[in-house]
Image: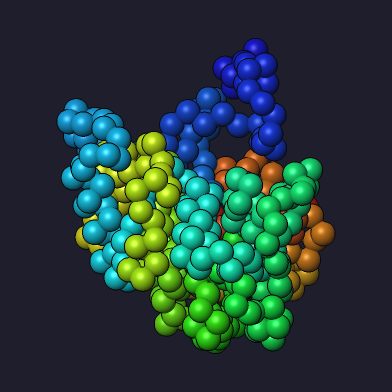
Amino acid sequence: MSLQAELIRRHEQSLIGNYGKLPVVFVRGDGALLWDAADRQYLDFFAGFGGSILGHCHPALVNAVRQQAQTLWHVGNQFYSEPQIRLAEQIVSKGFPGRVFFCHSGAEAVEAALKLARISGGPARTRTIAMLQAFHGRTMGALSATAGPARNGFTPLLEGFIHVPFNDVPALEARMDATVSAVIVEPVQGEGGVNMPSEDYLQQVRRLCDRHGAALIFDEVWTGVGRTGRYFGHQHYGVVPDIMTLGKALGGGLPVGAILARPRWAVFFQPTTHGCTLGGNPICAAAAAAVFDVLERQNLVEYARQAGVFLRDAIKNFRCAPRRIAQVRGLGLFIGVEMTLPDAAPVVRAALDHGLVINVTHKNVLRICPSLVITRPQMEQALDILQRAMESV
């Protein structure tokens, strides 16, 4: 039995089977490259659901973790720690004036944002409006804001959540009133199929929230930390939220979540209202602060914008595009390729067989989100594999 087969066997015996697995065991990575247990090389164009924003084993992140691990591991949030302060300052400086709360994941960030909006609105504001095809996480509050198959088997969920179509201002306006504590929306819907808003949609949502006194929450778990060609996705549309949620890329692959709340809203989280045992852990915070340092020093946010244009244009011009591709959409290195096929999973598997890691969402949308350290030759190689994978199914 091969090492890969043996590891898969041991996994099946010891882990709960709640993930759909592909038959590959990755054992090491370097930049945009991965190697499996058989020492086969792959191009990583998925970056672990977007988390590895600087690829694998980036020297700056390795150094930040090593130095911090030799200095201070964990003290708890009843004390101050410098890495946490430094990371919060990075988020505020790249985002908007406000204050930060740290947690472990994007889902927990959404929970914090929903709770902050609820407590700030008082007892009369008990409803939250979210969008159809949204995905906000798998905890019970975040799942209540989510619309889709992830809810199956977990109903009844929390009361007070209303779903309206994404990109439909009249539908949203019809549900707005003085009982709404918050509207939560992704600047680009990730799990829903990399769905893009119209040019003025987020601006109109902002106006409705202002008119009705509700908090506007932007879920930037997918779109934050440079992936879209701006530090945060909402910056493409000239709209500032009241609360922003972050996760995935924030830790560069380590478990870091956060919210950034404007001062008017941040003050409602007082001692005992909300907390997180390991939130802002010094090692994770040091790594996340290093992510921002690298993005700025190497101008990778602008590079993501340019690389995204190159990839989207190239995919639109594939030989098979007229019969295989319905639409290519996205911002920066957050790209959705909607296939004419009802199920694009065979394309993902064919690409993997040829050494390219991508993902499918919403059944027929290929999601392409490599790290921001991807090189032009690697993009060209990936495009060649992707085209052949599309043609083979």
The residue at the point 68 percent across, 21 percent down is: 12
In-front residue for pair 204/322: 204
Q: Is residue 163 above or below residue 152?
A: below
Q: Is residue 257 left or right of residue 351?
A: left
> Along the line of sight, which residue is nearer the eye, 138 or 391?
138
Toward the front, the furthest residue is 123
Vertical relation: 267 (above or below) 23 = below
Residue sitting farthest toward the top: 1
Q: Tell me, yes or no, if residue 391 can be seen here.
A: no
159 over 256 or under it: above or below:
below
* Residue appearing at x 47%, y 46% in the figure: 105
Which residue is drawn at the image coordinates 77% and 49% (left, top)? 156
Most extreme residue toward the right is 342
Q: Nearer the viewer, residue 127 or 89?
A: 127
At x 63%, y 66%, the residue is 127
> Which residue occupies the foreground of this view, 106 or 6?
106
Q: Is residue 163 something one can see in this rendering? A: yes
Horizontal placement of 249 versus 178: left or right?
Answer: left
Q: Position of residue 229 (x, y in %)?
A: 41, 69
Numbered disc total: 0
Q: Position of residue 148 (x, y in %)?
A: 74, 57
**Picture quadrant where residue 319 is located:** bottom right
The colour scheme applied to this rendered structure is rainbow
The x and y percentages for residue 2 are 61, 16
Q: Position of residue 338 (x, y in %)?
A: 70, 66
Placement of the N terminus among the 4 image quadrants? top right
